[in-house]
C-alpha cells in the first residue's frame, strides 16, 4: 500500500466512509482496508490519527521525487523507502557524510589500508588473513 493510499484511507474513514466504499474507490482489497484501519485505530467517528497526519507537511523523496507525507511530531523523512535511500547513497557517494573511516595496518603484510566502519579489522584482505593463519601457526584473537 502506498503512502498516498494510506492518506486517502485516513481521509475517507474520518469522513465516515465504509470499508467497502474505500476499497472500491482505491482499487484495493476490503480486507486490506480493514486491517489498515484496525492497526491505525481508525473508526468512522475518530479522525484524530488523520488530523495528525494531515497537519504535517508534504515533502518529496530525495531520490525519486515521490510525495512524502510527514507526520507531525516525528522525525522528518528524506526518502520514501529504504530502496530509494540506498539508491541515493549508491549514486552520491561524495555527498554522503562518512565519519567512520579508519586507517589501519595489515597484521600480515604491513600495508596501510582504509576501512569503513570496522576499526577492529586486522588484515587488508582475506588472502592476508589466510596466509597469516597458515604461517602464524593458527594464532587468533
Image: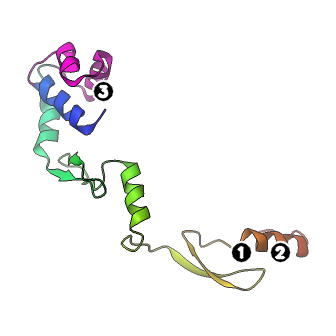
Left or right? Give the position of 79 relative to 108.
Answer: left
Left or right? Give the position of 95 relative to 108.
Answer: left
User: Is residue 139 in view from this perspective?
Assistant: no
* Mark closer to the chain start, 1 or 2: 1
Is the magenta region chiefly helix, strand or loop? helix
How far is mark 1 from mark 2, CA to CA? 9 Å
How far is mark 1 from mark 3, CA to CA? 49 Å
Residue 86 is drawn in which quadrant? bottom left
Q: Nearer the viewer, residue 62 or 43?
A: 62
91 in relation to 51, above or below: below
Q: Residue at x 21, y 17 (%)?
A: 24
How far is mark 3 from mark 2, CA to CA? 55 Å
Q: Position of residue 5 (x, y in %)?
A: 23, 32
* Mark closer to the chain start, 3 or 2: 3
46 in relation to 103, above or below: above
User: Is residue 38 in view from this perspective?
Assistant: yes
Q: Nearer the viewer, residue 98 or 62?
A: 62
Question: Which numbered disc, 3 or 2, marks the residue closer to the eye?
Answer: 2
90 in relation to 39, above or below: below
Q: Magenta span has 18?
A: yes
Q: Position of residue 14 (x, y in %)?
A: 11, 25
Q: Which residue is mark 1?
A: 123
Left or right? Give the position of 105 relative to 99.
Answer: right
Q: Which residues are magenta?
A: 15-43
Circle 2: element type:
helix
The numbered disc on residue 39 is 3
Residue contact between numbered discs 1 and 2, judged by CB atoms under 8 Å: yes
Amino acid at each position: 500500500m502506498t503512502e498516498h493510499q494510506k492518506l486517502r484511507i485516513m481521509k475517507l474513514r474520518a469522513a465516515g466512509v465504509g470499508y467497502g466504499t474505500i476499497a472500491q474507490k482505491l482499487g484495493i482489497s476490503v480486507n486490506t482496508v480493514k486491517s489498515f484501519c484496525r492497526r491505525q485505530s481508525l473508526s468512522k467517528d475518530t479522525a484524530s490519527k488523520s488530523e495528525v497526519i494531515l497537519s504535517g507537511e508534504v515533502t518529496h523523496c530525495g531520490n525519486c521525487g515521490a510525495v512524502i507525507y510527514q507526520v507531525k511530531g516525528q522525525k522528518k523523512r528524506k526518502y520514501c523507502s529504504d530502496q530509494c535511500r540506498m539508491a541515493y547513497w549508491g549514486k552520491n557517494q561524495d555527498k554522503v557524510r562518512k565519519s567512520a573511516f579508519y586507517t589501519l595496518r595489515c597484521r600480515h603484510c604491513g600495508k596501510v589500508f582504509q576501512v569503513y566502519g570496522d576499526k577492529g579489522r586486522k588484515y587488508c584482505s582475506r588472502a592476508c588473513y589466510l596466509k597469516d593463519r597458515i604461517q602464524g601457526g593458527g594464532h587468533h584473537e
